[in-house]
Image (cartoon, rainbow, N blue to C red):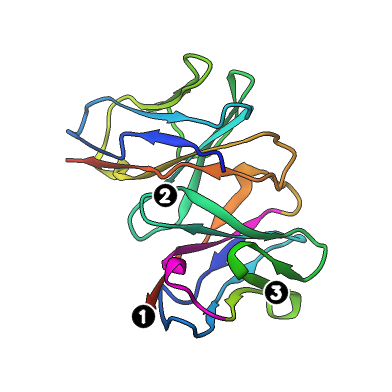
Amino acid sequence: AQSVTQLDSHVSVSEGTPVLLRCNYSSSYSPSLFWYVQHPNKGLQLLLKYTSAATLVKGINGFEAEFKKSETSFHLTKPSAHMSDAAEYFCVVSDGRNPGANNLFFGTGTRLTVIP
Amino acid sequence: EPEVTQTPSHQVTQMGQEVILRCVPISNHLYFYWYRQILGQKVEFLVSFYNNEISEKSEIFDDQFSVERPDGSNFTLKIRSTKLEDSAMYFCASSDRGSGNEKLFFGSGTQLSVL
């Protein structure tokens, strides 16, 4: 069975400092993993995805995530937070055996606040 | 970047009433989806739609729910007789292929409140 745990419901960082949003997953098969971001009054936007290629994945807006199978983690990082990064972030896992939009498992989300 | 549009952004209804949530997917997309997120819970898959028929649906998507693509642009979710537990944020999504691991474009959601 697939599941995703986002360890922090709320993360607050100062502008210019690093961002770390944690995600752990459970999957019986080789998963695909995604990070989505939702800005206020906007749709969910794909930040990056891992699909069994390079374990370090670079996404948009300077974000990246590293797939660590031994730790079953897919944490999202950014070296320097910007005010525009304030949003809700969702970690998502797709069933590796039956990939598809009907088999996406979402975390509960992490709200990132950036302090000026 | 193209966007999926959902209307209304917020819908309030009385229990037992029918509601229709509307979505305009990206114009050249062929696969359409509805998800929902009850407050404090995870986003859950409801249904996928392709070639004018449902391709997959979850256990949540019971007989009270239906989807339709009434014209070339809209994709609607109808809840026939709303219950209190239907209160949630409903997200529409679309993609240009359904091969798995496809890039989904999501709308900004409709917050449904059932009183």
Disc 1 element: loop
What is the CA distance from the residue labelled 1 to the residue labelled 3? 27 Å
* Marker disc for residue A116: 1
- Residue A1 visible somewhere in the drawing: no
Q: Which residues are magenta?
A: A80-95
Label 1 crowd (10 A; few <14 / some 14-19 / many >=20) = few
Which image quarter holds the C terminus of chain A?
bottom left
Q: Is residue A31 magenta?
A: no
Disc 3 element: strand
In screen coordinates, is B83 left or right of B47?
left
| Residue type highlighted by circle 1 | Pro
Q: Nearer the viewer, residue A40 or B53?
A: A40
Q: Find the residue positioned furthest to the top.
A: B71
Q: Nearer the viewer, residue A40 or B34?
A: A40
Label 3 crowd (10 A; few <14 / some 14-19 / many >=20) = some
Circle nearer the N terminus (1, 3): 3
Q: Position of residue A36 (x, y in %)?
A: 55, 58
Q: Position of residue A114 (x, y in %)?
A: 40, 76
Verify CB contact (< 8 Å) between mark 1 and mark 3.
no
Residue receiving disc 2: A42
| Residue type highlighted by circle 2 | Lys
Residue receiving disc 3: A66
Discs 1 and 3 lie in a common subunit: yes
Verify CB contact (< 8 Å) between mark 2 and mark 1.
no
Which image quarter holds the N terminus of chain A?
bottom right
